[in-house]
Image (tube, grey):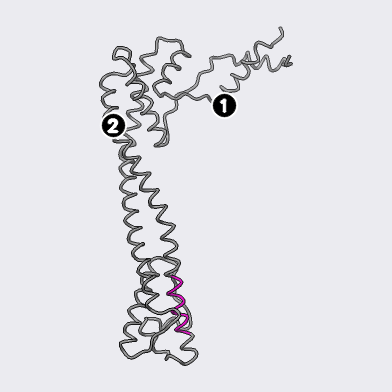
Amino acid sequence: MRIVDKNTKLAYFRNKVHVMPYRRLPTTDKARLRALEVCYKKISSCKPDENAVSEHLSTKLKVFLPRFQQAIINQEAAKKNQIEKSKQYTELQRKARLYISHFIQVMNMAITRAELKPQIREFYDLLNYENTVPPLNAEKDLIDWGKKIIHGDQKRIQNGGSPIYNPSIALVKVNYEKFTDAYHFQKTLQTTTDRNSKQVNDLRSEADKLIQNLWNEVEQNFQPLHNAKKRAMSEEYGVVYVYRKSEKKKMEAKQLLPEFNF
């Protein structure tokens, strides 16, 4: 038999109060949706005269729930699609940066070997980047410099310049255009995600108010019942109860009661 000292006994009886959990409203969209779905399922399975929710709130729930469900589905699908496409986009961005950087480096080496004149940097707007590569990390910088390099090389060739190889400007252009296409597509995905997220945000306060009203009605309906029975019946409608840490300790102490040796 477990031995319980005198201090533990006294502490229990000093704090001998009803252990009452508190109601906790959902704080995430998934939890909100789950609360509404549980309540809807319970209402749908009840006879009209056994339903703990008024007809008015039941109708509001039936109208609101599909809207909230679809908004969350759209939001999650948009986020998932954006994340999946972002992996491909990151790789295309890396390759575009690599080809543009290598083209500039090859051109600079050709100038160092006196195969090309230093003045050709003017075609590419690179006069301030002698023997260096301009910043290409940011998306905007990569887009701007890619455009300058491609258009600049076209002008240089039109003025009688010889082609640069390894990489050729054609390969630079192919990889640059793949990147810019992916960039614009990624922006479209971001817009879609933002729009769907805004829709969920707009519905969130309505969901919170509806859940609170539903739970209030349910608890009010079961008010005459004993606390434990009332909570059990309310939980069938999705009401969530949790215990504070102090209350959990009291419950643990209560479990020791049968073993006290008076």
Which residue sits furthest top? 262
Q: Which image quarter is the C terminus in?
A: top right
- Does residue 161 sit above or below 182 in this rendering? below
- Does residue 177 sit above or below 42 in this rendering? below
On whether residue 117 falls in the magenta region, the answer is no
Left or right of 166: which side holds 211?
Answer: left
Q: Residues within 10 Å of mark 2 (few under 14, many from 20)?
A: some
Q: Amino acid at mark 2?
A: Phe
Q: Quadrant of residue 151?
A: bottom left
Majority secondary structure of the magenta segment? helix
On whether residue 105 falls in the magenta region, the answer is yes
| Magenta stretch, residue numbers | 97-108
The residue to which callout 2 is attached is: 64
Q: Quadrant of residue 38?
A: top left
Q: Which image quarter is the N terminus in?
A: top right
Residue at mark 1 to residue at mark 2: CA–CA distance: 35 Å
Residue at horizontal 37 percent and vertical 70 percent from the top: 176
Q: Position of residue 254 (x, y in %)?
A: 61, 15
Q: Position of residue 102 (x, y in %)?
A: 46, 77
**Mark toward the start of the polypeptide (1 vs 2):** 2
The residue to which callout 1 is attached is: 245
Residue at horizontal 38 percent and vertical 44 percent from the top: 76
Q: Secondary structure at mark 2?
A: helix
Q: Amino acid at mark 1?
A: Lys
Q: As rendered, which of 31 and 96 lies closer to the eye?
A: 96
